[in-house]
Image (cartoon, helix red, strand yellow):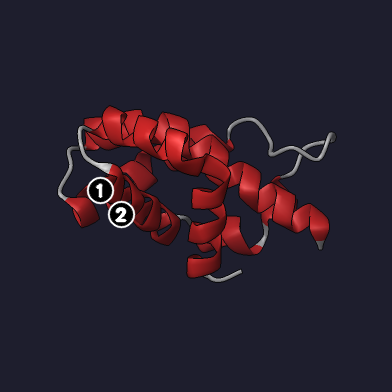
Amino acid sequence: MGDDQLQQAVLDELGDDRVQELADDLGTDAEGAKRVVAATVEALPEELTGEAEGLAGPGGGLAVGVLGRISGPVARAVAKRTGLSVGTVSRGLELLLPVVLGVIAKRRRRG
């Protein structure tokens, strides 16, 4: 799954209302929130986007701990790419990462 496809799938999953919610959390506008989505997708470890099946738990959901393991490094990478502070990005990732991981898991289940 390419970064552009994943990014669009995440934006579709978020919808306009949640993109605006993310923008509010980040202190930016909808376009700024979309840039953070793009930077987040780009910052994801390849093992996550390429081998998400290995992260799935018994119910098909992503294993607990994945968010904790990736949130710090992803927040730092996104902050560097966007110019936002790590703290601001971290707050936004609380909303964004579960959606991103959900999209990845859903796509992996579909085959």
For residue 50, side relative to residue 93 (left or right): right
According to the picture, the residue beneath numbered tag 2 turns out to be 35
Q: Amino acid at mark 1?
A: Gly
Where does residue 81 sit, x and y in percent of width and height? 23, 56
Q: Which residue is mark 1?
A: 32
Numbered tag placed on residue 86 in the rendering: none
Which residue is at 81% across, 58% downward? 110
Residue under the point 26% across and 34% down: 26
User: Residue 65, how many percent across, how many down?
Assistant: 58, 32
Judge from the rendering whether residue 56 lies leftward or rightward of residue 73; answer left or right.
Answer: right
Q: Nearer the viewer, residue 110 or 52?
A: 110
Q: Position of residue 23 (x, y in %)?
A: 30, 36
- Between 45 and 85, the residue placed more toward the observer is 85
Residue 111: image quadrant is bottom right
Question: Quarter holding the N terminus?
Answer: bottom right
| Mark 1–mark 2 distance (CA, rounded to whole Å) | 5 Å
Figure check: 4 above or below 24: below
Q: Give the quadrant of residue 92.
A: top left
Query: Which amino acid is tagged 2?
Result: Arg
**53 versus 86 height, above or below:** below
Vertical relation: 5 (above or below) 96: below
Q: Mark 1–mark 2 contact, CB under 8 Å?
A: yes
Of the pair 65 and 108, the residue shown nearer to us: 108
49 relative position to 26: left or right: right
Tag 2, which secondary structure? helix
User: Which residue is at a point 45% across and 34% down the rendered structure image?
Assistant: 18
Please say if 40 is above or below 28: below
Q: Is label 1 in a helix, a strand or a loop?
A: helix
